Amino acid sequence: MKKSVQLLWRFFFIGAGIFLIILLLANFGVFGKMPSLQELENPSASLASEVIASDGTVMGKFYLQDRSNVEFKDISKNAVNALIATEDERFYTHSGIDGWALARAIGKLGSDGGGSTITQQLAKNLFTDNASTKNIVKRILQKLKEWIIAVKLERNFTKDEIVALYFNTVPFGDNVYGIRNASRTFFQKEPSLLTVNEAAVLVGMLKGNTIYNPRRDARRSQMRRNVVIDQMVKNNFIALAEAEKIKAEPIPLNYKKLDESTGIAPYFRDVVRDYMKKWCKEHKKANGDNYNIYQDGLKIYTTINPRMQLYAEEAVAKHLSALQKSYWTLPWIKTNSIWKGHEKILERGMKESDRWKNMEAEGIAEEDIRKSFQTKTRMKVFAWNNKRETDTLMTPFDSIRYHKMIIQTGFMAMDPFTGEVKAWVGGVNFKTFKYDHVNLNTKRQVGSTFKPILYAYAVENGFTPETPLPSGPINLGGKIITGSGGPMAVCLAYSKNPGAAYLMNQFGVKPVITFAQTAGIKSKLQPFPSLALGAAEISVYEMLQAYSMFPTNGMSTEPIFISRIEDKNGNILESYAPAQKMVLSEASAYTMTKMMKGVVDFGTGRRLRGMGLSNEIAGKTGTTNDNTDTWFIGFTPQLLAGGWVGCDDPFLKMVGEGNRTALPIWGYFMSSVLNDKTLAISKDAVFVQPESMKVETFMDYENFAEKYRNEPDAENPDAGSGTSSDFDQMQYSPEQNIGPESQLSKDEQKILQEAKKEPSAKPEEKKPEPKPEEKKPEKEKKGILNNLFKKKKPEAKPGSPGA
């Protein structure tokens, strides 16, 4: 053998030996940590946590990278074929490294494509660093690690599992990761339903998810899609004729990305986020690290019913859009005279704005900043329409004043027996107004909605609906309360203040406070006699818990909004049970319910009867001095709901009491709920008198109540900036076409509209109605809110934490 040949073989074997040694060293982590088998089986890529409604609807996500896992069986064959044809033609024949592709890449210096297989790309995406480094040594070591990991992946996973894992981890632009989220974001459908056109667009984006993003550049995206389709033809996945037909079609883009403002119940999801952040700090994974809401792919199952949530949002929009329209016509609002003496609020709002802070950070003088706030600028402001915004020309200062005069609300619905929160509307628009008016931290004066708590204590201590309560004047802690009296049931129905003052004087403040706290009021109640008239500041959340004792025959039920929390693999990390306790005898609870029915049948809440609601309803209106805070809380035998209406700054008063400003939201909501047969909230349900009370009879208050009535109702003796007559003279035309704040696809909107329609009766077909669990939808609807109206069998009723 020639010396030159010997030398060549020597170099070859030495080189091969050195290469093997380097591979071994790389495998043992000398050049950087290598993943263990456990890490290979459980990739650490950031996984979005999902908030899930009671019917399985994904309401929204919490993420740093928007990614959700999907199994191979749930990925369209079109997407798999497009990927194989474009990225790795010999995927099903190699073992992680494609020698032919590697030789081609080296021989042609990468001009005819790279040599990386799908498995190698997966290894690079999940387990290696220095992918974009210009340091050739680091890049070579990184490539070696890719090969080793790719081989390990091939040995431990099936080909289909590798494809699924790849699809679950690749980025698609717009901070969207994984085929499932990409399919939902760009086409509003599940990945199993992707067409060849759609699949080719998504796979085409993998070459460059910014330049081939169809939202950013439709022309480039279409060109890249056509390249993918040509590759599918070349690899015999589709016929040439079909390919040409598809290439002539536009991209069927239907873009909608879930963020903090989109999806179902944005205010509610923000409450869930706050709770889960705290939960994660208190709970650890098996490796000792705390859970991370943004990275660990938690599944947070909530009690929200999507239909009820949408009905609640629609009710708010329908009523408050009309109320706001009327509010703008008030003289003291039109002239801005209401702001006299409150200029500091606007000054504070200006200095707390992003505009002020940004200009100040740039070193702009305060004088110039103030001038900019008086210069008209093109901007978007909140408006009552489907988009909840409009373009306008306005000074930044005026926009601050404008937004502060937007009427706000907090509305919640719950099952009083299980505590499950079914709907949560924290305000009129989360995108513009982040402040939540339902949760425990938001407290407003409750006015006369506190009276049922006081009356319940009185009934529990021997008073009856027929017990006469005196007229005024009555001294209540130094303030003289005037007005008429009458039987206790009539005083509650008409919200007569002397009756409440008399009861407070009879029992004293401290026992009433103790009872209120037992019923579920967690807010600090000041020991002042004015508590009888609702001077206390309490949250909507607490008030609904307190009212739960009436329809449940005396059981106080804490509202719950999370049923269970699961990890990304479906393991239950925590489940919740409702907290309940008996706080009132069943006789007293039924007696109170009977009296609160009078509020609706002939008292301050009788407006509900004018809204077409004829079912059994009990409730109470509430209004504070000067109409600052207005309330209505009501319940049927199956559902409890209520809320507050007002402005964030208390001096911006409402016009009209709670029965005009807050009650209509309840009425619109309940009307939609009762007309939706799938919700099983019956118009025929009745409050059942307990067996222990069967011998008792109740006087017919309605037949003689009018003789005790004084105009106006004692709901709010101090009307302040306006009276109910002002309200009646104002333009009041409820908007019919403003949809819910939660964003739905067109198909889902259509389903919702169909659900509201009364079923058409067909006399000739009197077939028995199938049981709810036997009903099957004609066609399953897919999308971001897939299964939105797909009814499931009820699960066991676990509970969840408080707000």
Image: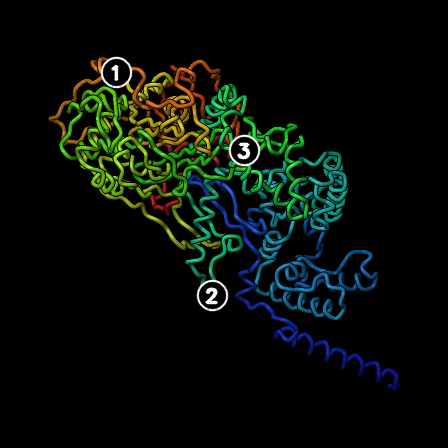
Query: SS class of the residue under badge 2?
Result: loop
Q: Where is residue 730 in the image (x, y as percent from the top left)?
A: 47, 15
Q: Is residue 511 placed above or below 496 in the rendered structure?
A: below
Residue 261 spot, x, y in % from top left: 54, 39
Disc number placed over residue 744 in the picture, else none: 3
Q: Quadrant of residue 441?
A: top left
Q: Distance between the residues labelled 1 and 3?
A: 47 Å
Quadrant location of the C terminus? top left
Task: Measure the C-alpha gap from mark 3 to mark 2.
Answer: 40 Å
Which residue is outermost to the left? 695
Chain-order first, disc 3 or disc 2:
2
Q: Earlier in the sequence, mark 1 or mark 3?
A: 1
Q: Residue 777 carries which label?
A: none
| Label 1 with label 2: CB-CB less than 8 Å | no
Front label number (1 vs 3): 1
Observer-side mark, 1 or 2, equals 1
Q: Residues within 10 Å of mark 3 (few under 14, many from 20)?
A: many
Q: Residue 709 carries which label?
A: 1
Identify which amino acid the numbered label 1 is placed on: Arg
- Image height check: is 512 above or below 362? above
Place of residue 308 in the rendered image (x, y in percent of width and height, measured from the top left): 42, 32
- Residue at image mark 2: 287
